[in-house]
Structures are given as C-alpha cells and as structure tokens.
C-alpha cells in the first residue's frame, strides 16, 4: 500500500455550471441563452434533451450546499448565467437573478465553503448572439461590462473568479467543429471568436484589479495530452501542432503576449486570418493570479495525411475508456501539468475540472461507481507526482458535484459524484462521493 498524502495547503472543491444544473430556464426573469436555442433545435443534442429543468438547482440550491458541506470541501466552483442577471446581455439588471446568486453565495459562506465564480461557462445571452455573438468585436465591451457588474455585486463576498471556461470549446468546438452552440462550422469565425474570448478575458482582468483588489482571478483552458505514437518526426510534429491548438493558442497570448506563429500560418493556409489590433496582446497578457486547468483525457497521436486541420489521428493507448468514450490517460495529466509549468513558469494552478463519465444507476439507494473512484485515484496520483516535481498546484476541483446536462450528450452521460434522478430531481450520493469525502478529510488516500 502506498500512501498518497497531499500538502495541507492543497484546497479541494467540486464544480458545476449554470446551464448544466440550474433549470428554471424561463423563471425569475431569465432570458434564453445560445444553449436554450441550440438544445431546442432538433438534432443538436442527444435525445432532444434541453437544460429547461436540468437538476433544478435554481430551486434546490440549499440542498446542494448541504451536500457540499457534508463533503467537507473548501471551494465550490459554479458559474453565473449571464442571461439570468442581464437578460438583454447589456443594460438592465434583473434583480431576481442577482438575488438568486446572492443567496447561493451567502448559503455557501454560512456553511464554510468558499465560492469560486466562473463568469462565462458557454451560455451567452441569445440577444447578444443575434448581434453577432463572440464573432464580433463589440462582444468584448459587453463582456467587460457584465464582468464589472458582477464584480461590483458580489466582490465583497467572492474573492476567487474565473473569466472564461474552456475557450477552445467556446471557439473551435462551437464554431468550427459545430458540436456546441452556436453550432457553426467556419474556421474564420472560430479564430475570431477565440481572439475575442481572450480579449474579453484580458479586459475583465483589468477591471477586476480596480474593483476587487484583494481578489484572485484566472481562466480555465482545457487541455488534453497527445503523446507521439512513434519517435518519427512526422508523429512528433503532428502532436505538437495539435497540442498547440489547445494549449499555446490559448496560453501564449495570456502568459507571453504572443500567438504561436506556426498556427497563425496554418490557419492562414486555410484562409482564416487572425485579426489582432494594436494593443490587444498587451490587454490579453494582463497578469492573472492563477491558471485553471481542465483535464480529462489524452491519446497517442499519429501523423495521417488529410486528417483534420492538423493531419493527426488520435489512437487510444489501450482499451480503457470512460462511458463517454474518452480514453483514460492519467499519465497525460502529469505530462500536461509539468509541461505547462515548464513553459509558463510558476503561476499557481488550480485543477478547475477533472472527473469521469460513468453512467451507473441507483441500486438499493447506493451507486457503486468504483470505476469513477479508480479514475480519481489515478489522476490524483498523477497530480501528486506533479506536485513532487515542483508544479505549484493550489487546488483540485472535481467535475462534477452532480450528474447534469452534458451539453451535446444530454443527460445520458453522467459525471457527478452525486446521482440525479431527472424525473424527481432526487439526489443520491455515489460511492465516489463517500470516497472523495474521506480523501478530503485525510488530505490523501491509500492505493
Ligand atoms: C466534445 C471533440 C470531433 C465539460 C469534444 C471535445 C470531438 C471531431 C466537459 N467541460 O461538462 C466535448 N467537456 O461543462 C466543461 N469538456 O469533441 C464542463 N470538453 O471532436 C463539462 C471536448 C468536449 C468537452 C466536454
């Protein structure tokens, strides 16, 4: 038996996002977001699922906070639904929406849990999409104004903030691959969106410094790991290009004030131009307090002529996959963390998401999700190795507290450490919840 023991300073958390858990889509003065429109468009989400009711956390938030309290964690990461607090995207504030988040924040604090807010977890107000969405530069000002309002409303109680969740998903997955809202398939659009997301991030960080000087802010890029299939230069280069797309494209501008030239060229060869105005990169590289990393999966990458933008095909290391079909690659987590540390230096890192999809159901009041426990053990062991290698990891936040609306996959794919019955909204703690609770209490576990 090995003892995996974490430093006392490592913080523990659980994460959710507004559209995935709140429900109450047309209650309390909320207006539609791009995800309401997308999920109500036939064929976009599996089984025609929508976030209309989700986990009903809008009404059940007190119950959720009790689940968090019993779990014993330090932090709860949740997101604000922009269209719940500013239904038109800009202008008039919706008091009921503000009250909902104010109550949630107070409930967390009263139960000894530190709130961590994500400003943008993909649910752009539809009103703004109709004005061009992230594709047009005006969105940056709208986001900054929304961010400032949230900082002013909640900054006295909330000191940890994230601007943008998974900018790769919000740009390329949503506007080039067409898998997430708004479901476009245009590389130029995706490149423009990615730049505007980063610019909006930088502007929000600038505002943050003035409004919450004693707070900490970061963002949460998602990164997988691609390990070259062979030492052949073609495979090594293919992996490099693909990693650059997820990692350097969204991190170099923030931490180095540059875009990776190789990718700028590659996009240009596909007739997509990076439109950067003077001063943009200085704004984007406004220093952050920490970096959020979302890690789930990785594969081997092999050069394949004509395969996607980067001529790389992904080959799983072995048969092990979660129920969403993502290969399990815990060593990739270690590699991502040490690689980022090496490239970007000593910026503190929060694992803002890590977790696994397994669809176990309830049996006699229990959910025996030993596969999820195994996944968490493997990834926390990799994280422990990264800490020992000197990576400054400040916290680990599991995705997710609850089973929830898994975007284009709908409700079929379950990531929660708590099971949700979508007919009754009943919550049932899974075995992984009890395991995580013990791990948090002991600040470690045995393997
Ligand atoms: C799909 C790649 C096909 C969420 C995807 C890539 C397929 C050519 C989980 N993270 O629910 C989905 N999640 O809200 C944020 N992260 O398709 C939180 N990334 O290409 C979780 C990535 C994802 C994806 C899903």
Image: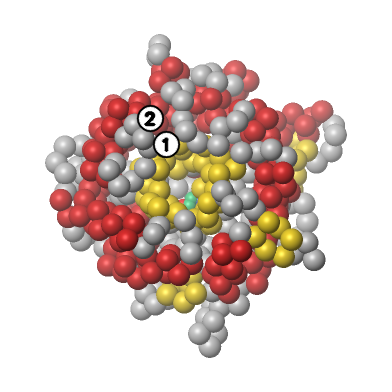
Say which quarter of the image contains residue 440.
bottom right
Instruction: Answer whether labels 2 and 1 touch (C-beta < 8 Å).
Output: yes
Residue 310 place in picture, x, y as percent: 65, 32
Q: Which residue is found at the position 27% from the left and 54% from the top? A: 101
Q: Is mark 2 within 8 Å of ligand 1?
A: no
Q: Residue at x 30, y 55 (%)?
A: 105
- SS of the residue at dot 2? helix
Which image quarter is the N terminus in?
bottom right
Residue 167 as seen in the image, left or right of residue 349: left
Q: Secondary structure at mark 1?
A: strand
Please give left or right for residue 174 compared with residue 356 in the image.
left
Q: Is residue 108 above or below residue 332?
A: below
Report the side of 445 relative to 324 (left or right): right
Front-most of 400 and 380?
380
> What residue is pinned by disc 2?
205
Name which residue lies at 40% across and 53% down. 114
Q: Picture coordinates of residue 369 (x, y %)?
A: 61, 73
On residue 217, which mark appears? 1
In front here: 75 or 362? 75
Determine the CA span between mark 2 and mark 1.
Answer: 7 Å
> Relative to residue 373, is residue 292 drawn left or right?
left
Residue 366's spot in the image, x, y percent? 54, 82
**Is the residue 241 above or below the residue 273 in the image?**
below
Residue located at (18% from left, 58% from top): 28
Label 1 CA crowd tier, 10 Å (few <14, some 14–19, many 20+): many
């Amino acid at each position: 038996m090995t003892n995996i023991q974490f430093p006392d300073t490592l913080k523990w958390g659980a994460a959710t996002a507004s559209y995935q858990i709140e429900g109450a889509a047309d209650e309390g003065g909320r207006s539609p977001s791009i995800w309401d429109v997308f999920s109500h468009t036939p064929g976009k989400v599996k089984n025609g699922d929508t976030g209309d009711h989700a986990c009903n956390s809008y009404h059940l938030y007190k119950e959720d906070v009790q689940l968090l309290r019993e779990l014993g964690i330090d932090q709860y990461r949740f997101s604000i639904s922009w269209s719940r607090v500013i239904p038109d995207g800009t202008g008039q504030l919706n008091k009921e929406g503000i009250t909902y988040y104010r109550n949630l924040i107070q409930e967390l604090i009263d139960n000894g849990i530190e709130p961590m807010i994500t400003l943008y977890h993909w649910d752009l107000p539809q009103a703004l999409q109709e004005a061009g969405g992230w594709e047009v530069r005006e969105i940056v000002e709208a986001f900054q104004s929304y961010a400032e309002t949230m900082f002013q409303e909640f900054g006295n109680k909330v000191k940890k903030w994230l601007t943008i969740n998974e900018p790769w998903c919000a740009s390329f997955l949503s506007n080039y691959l067409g898998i997430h809202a708004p479901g476009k398939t245009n590389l130029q659009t995706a490149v423009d969106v990615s730049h505007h997301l980063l610019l909006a991030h930088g502007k929000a960080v600038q505002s943050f410094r003035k409004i919450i000087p004693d707070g900490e802010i970061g963002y949460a890029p998602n990164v997988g790991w691609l390990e070259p299939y062979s030492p052949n230069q073609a495979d090594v280069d293919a992996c490099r290009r693909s990693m650059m797309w997820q990692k350097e494209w969204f991190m170099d501008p923030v931490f180095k004030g540059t875009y990776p030239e190789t990718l700028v060229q590659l996009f240009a060869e596909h007739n997509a131009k990076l439109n950067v105005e003077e001063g943009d990169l200085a704004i984007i590289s406004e220093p952050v307090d920490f970096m959020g990393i979302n890690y789930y999966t990785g594969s081997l990458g092999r050069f394949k002529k004509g395969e996607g933008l980067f001529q790389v095909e992904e080959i799983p290391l072995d048969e092990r996959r979660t129920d969403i079909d993502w290969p399990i690659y815990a060593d990739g987590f270690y590699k991502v963390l040490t690689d980022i540390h090496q490239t970007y230096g000593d910026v503190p890192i929060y694992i803002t998401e890590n977790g696994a999809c397994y669809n176990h159901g309830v049996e006699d009041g229990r959910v025996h999700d030993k596969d999820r426990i195994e996944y968490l053990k493997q990834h926390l062991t990799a994280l422990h190795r990264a800490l020992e290698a000197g990576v400054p990891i400040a916290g680990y936040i599991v995705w997710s507290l609850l089973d929830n609306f898994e975007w284009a996959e709908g409700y079929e794919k379950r990531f929660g450490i708590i099971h949700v019955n979508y007919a009754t909204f009943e919550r049932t703690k899974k075995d992984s919840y009890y395991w995580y609770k013990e791990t948090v209490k002991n600040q470690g576990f045995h393997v």
